[in-house]
Amino acid sequence: MANNLRNSRGMRWFVLSLVSFTMLCMYYLADLMAPLEERLQANLLWSGGDYGFFTSGYGWFNVFLLMLVFSGMILDKMGTRFTGILSIVIMIVGASVKYWGISGNLEGTVQLSIGSWEVLSPHAMSAAVAGLGFAIFGVGCEMFGISANKAIVRWFRGKEMALAIGLNTSTGRIGTALAMFTPIPLVKMTGSLSMPILIALLALCMGLLVFILFTMFDRRLDREERETGSTVADRFKFSDIVDIAKNRGFWYITVLCVLFYSAVFPFIKFAVKLISQKFDISDHFAGYIPALLPAAALLLTPVFGSLYDKRGKGATIMLAGSCLLVVVHLLFSIPSLNNFYAAIALVMLLGIAFAMVPSAMWPSVAKIIPEKKLGTAYAITFWVQNWGLMGVPLLIGHIRDKYCIADTVTKIVDGQEKTVSIYHYTIPMLIFACFGVLAILFSILLKKEDKKKGYGLELPNMSRK
């Protein structure tokens, strides 16, 4: 066992870096359209509803076709290597369709009509095709997310598990940060609204090559564990779903997950325009402020992960992060709070919450559910989460268009006069705050269940040897 790869500290961290690089590329592709919302509205004639529809596409197949649940079954049946490569290929296909939808090549070639009645205009078809691509991408994205988590749990169980998951999550936040401030300069340099997607596609292809390198080391670990008899069989059984479904603690953490992420990721999708209009700054510069959120998470997620590994208090960390979430969104909802420095401070506070909850949540699932069922458990959690990631952008987009339009103005966008809507964001931010209040409730229920069942969520992750 002394020569086992996972007992080599250097090898564990090297393997983590391989997985995390692909995670970075994945998150960059997932979030890079957020700073371009106003340009989509101006150049492709998308409405706020079109943008919300496109953003909701991420969860279509995962939710309605249960693709995430099937992904978990594939993961527990076929293992992390096969599932990880499959997920990246799916992401590449989906991002290619998304690129086609955004590229502006649909007009005159693809539209839906019945007789003389145009069912989908070219701009609506653009949103539909981009949404379809995002839906395909979302299947691969969530499949890779659960594969990465299971791979890290395997390599780091009994060691620096929460820190490793936190670092992996933080690397993904780098991708989100890059997605906040690089797309607009790329569009200005090239004159192409779809150029950021093309660059992100090339990066993801590099991520595929890097993950293939990971599979070589993981296969070697398999051989070593077979020789020592310590391997965990990756065999899915339908009874696993029943066992997981009976676990109350698992459902508390799953509901907490969807509530928390529904108050963060949809906020990021709308944040650039929110900050640009609420604080009266250009969308180019406004993109740098939401980028502070993943930057703060990048720095602090490993800190909270390491705290969980060494000191425990996982359920308490989740509760504290949920409380901070409510405070931030309530303050954002105040119309008179429009000071530029307040925007920076609130985004940084949200970044702290964004570091606290995931750094404790994902390792806690591994404490509640046995490793051989972990892929399916993560898949169910991600599936429920996708209801929020799909539904909340649709809800916010609809509410903005119906209740939050304060004015319409003519602006110069990339050298051209365009008519854009000016929104007020009090109602959307109050909705996000309500998600946070519910997250607090389920954090408290999780703490009580942990005390009752003894899952060890308040205990350290690292084995004391």
Image (cartoon, rainbow, N blue to C red):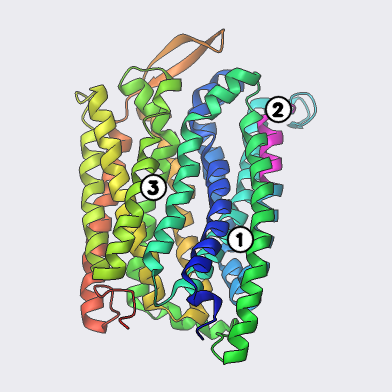
Measure how far apart labels 3 and 2 are at the Cα level: 47 Å
Q: Position of residue 407 (x, y in %)?
A: 37, 15
Within the image, what quadrant is residue 131 found in? Answer: top right
Q: What is the magenta range?
A: 94-105
Please say if 115 is above or below 58: above
Upstream in the sequence, badge 2 or badge 1? Answer: 1
Front of the two marks 3 and 2:
3
Name the element at disc 3: helix
Q: How crowded is mark 3: few (under 14 residues within 10 Å), some or many (20 or more)?
A: many
Residue 143 placement, left or right of 272: right
The residue lying toward the viewer, choosing from 175 and 311, is 311
Q: Can residue 123 be seen in this view?
A: yes
| Element assignment for label 1 | loop
Q: Looking at the image, is 187 positioned above or below residue 358?
A: above
The quarter in which the C terminus is drawn is bottom left
The residue beneath circle 1 is 65
Q: Of label 3 and label 1, which has the lower sequence position?
A: 1
- What number is the disc on residue 118? 2
The residue singled out by tag 3 in the image is 298
Which one is closest to the eye, mark 2 or mark 1?
1
Left or right: 448 as drawn, with respect to 73: left
**Residue at (37, 73) in percent of width and height:** 250
Q: Which amino acid does label 2 sit on?
A: Glu
- Give the label, 3 or 1, closer to the camera: 3
Name the spot of residue 244 as percent of width and height, x first: 44, 79
- Above or below for 305 versus 218: above
Secondary element at tag 2: strand
Please give the name of the residue rendered at 59% of the width and 22% of the height, measured from the top-left corner: 187
User: What's under tag 1, amino acid-wise?
Assistant: Leu
